[in-house]
Structure formats: C-alpha cells, structure tokens
Image (tube, rainbow, N blue to C red):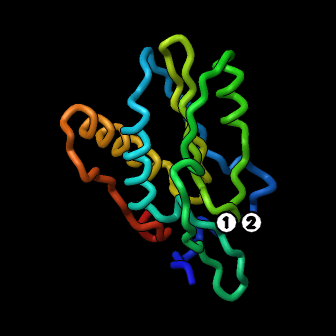
Amino acid sequence: MNRRLNAELWDKMHYLFRDFNDRMVHVDLRFDFVPDIDALKTVLICAFERAPVLHSKFVDNKLSTHWEVMPYRIEDVFSVEYADDMDEAVNKFLTQYISPTEDIQMKVALFVKDGKSALCMIENHMCMDGGGFKTFWSDFCKSYSDYVINGIYPLCFSVGSRKYTEV
C-alpha cells in the first residue's frame, strides 16, 4: 500500500469547486541563457522527495479523503523542448490541466530557442497556498544556484504544515 497524506480543508474546498475556477498555478520565467538541464533535474527530484504531495493523487473517499503518494520518474515531471515558436509552446504547456486524480501534481518544462529559454511550471493549487508557492520557488532558485555554483548537495527545501489552522 502506498503512503497516505491527510487531505486538508483547503484540498477539499478546491476539489469541490474544481469546475468553477482554474486550480492551476502557472509560472513562466524567461532567461537569456539555457540553465543546466541536469542540475534542474536534480533540484526537481529533491523538491519532489521533500514534498510528496507533488507526486500524489487525490482520493475522494467520503470516509477518508486523502492524498495517495505515488511513484514517479523525473521524465514524468520535467521535459525539455527545442521550440520553433517559443511563445506558442509555452502557451500550450501553461494551459494544460492536471487532474487531482493524476499521479503527478506539478509539471515543469524548459523551452529553448536561439540560446534563450523559458522555464515553465504548472502546479495543482491544492498542493500549496500562495505563501508556500513563493517559498517553494525561492528555495528552488537558491538550491539550483547553490548546486551549480558551489556544488552544495543535498539541497534544502522548506516544508511547512498544510493544515488550515497553520497556513
């Protein structure tokens, strides 16, 4: 049996209103260079291991609503595309939908064209609130820089409670 995480009030609320709002969080970061792809993969793996809700599926069980932690491969999470039309590729990626019943709740893509890149991410908003999302990206960027520039490993990601009483 896979590990379970409690479904919090926020998760249940978002799930109930899933047909009325966009539950995806969208990120589009543009660079005048191409980041280190292997380093991005390493940092993502560390993030996913530190926050297992990112590789969990939501189980709407009336008696015990919960997240079920699922196995994953980095290829399920991260992709690289050498795009002819970067804006079109980014838009197509950012407008996809991740169902809460899928095994992966965050997807990241790196789009590359002419030595420039766009690092894009979509994430199910049920997994973290705005403050958690800001902390996640701050930790992600710091971990990437520490790993690439200083060779610091293991990488550090903050983890807080997902309980509504502590948000």
Q: Residue 108, located in which quarter of the rendered image? A: top right
Picture residue at 81% right of the left edge, 55% below the top:
19
Q: Amino acid at mark 2?
A: Leu
Residue at which label 1 appears: 13
Residue 17 rendering spot, x and y as whole percentages:
75, 60
Q: Residue furthest top?
A: 114
Figure quadrant of the N terminus:
bottom right
Q: Which numbered dot is residue 72?
A: none
Residue 2 rendering spot, x and y as whole percentages:
55, 79
For this rendering, which residue is in front, 163 or 53?
53
For this rendering, which residue is in front, 110 or 64?
110
Picture residue at 39% right of the left edge, 61% below the top:
50
Picture residue at 37% right of the left edge, 63% below the top:
160
Q: Residue 41, located in which quarter of the rendered image? A: top left
Picture residue at 18% right of the left edge, 36% below the top:
150
Residue 57 versus residue 147 in the image, above or below: below
Q: Residue furthest bottom?
A: 63
Q: Are marks 1 and 2 in contact (CB under 8 Å)?
A: yes
Callout 2: helix, strand or loop?
A: helix
For this rendering, which residue is in front, 91 or 79?
79
- In space, the residues marked 1 and 2 are separated at their CA atoms by 5 Å
Number of residues whose C-alpha sits closer than 10 Å to that of mark 1, classed few (under 14), some (14–19) or many (20 or more): few
Residue 116 rendering spot, x and y as whole percentages:
49, 16
Callout 1: helix, strand or loop?
A: helix
Tell whether 37 sits left or right of 94: left
Residue 94 versus residue 55 in the image, above or below: above
Residue 166 versus residue 54 in the image, above or below: below
Q: How many marks?
A: 2
Residue at which label 2 appears: 16
Residue 3 versus residue 16 in the image, above or below: below
Q: Amino acid at mark 1?
A: Met
Residue 104 rendering spot, x and y as whole percentages:
60, 57
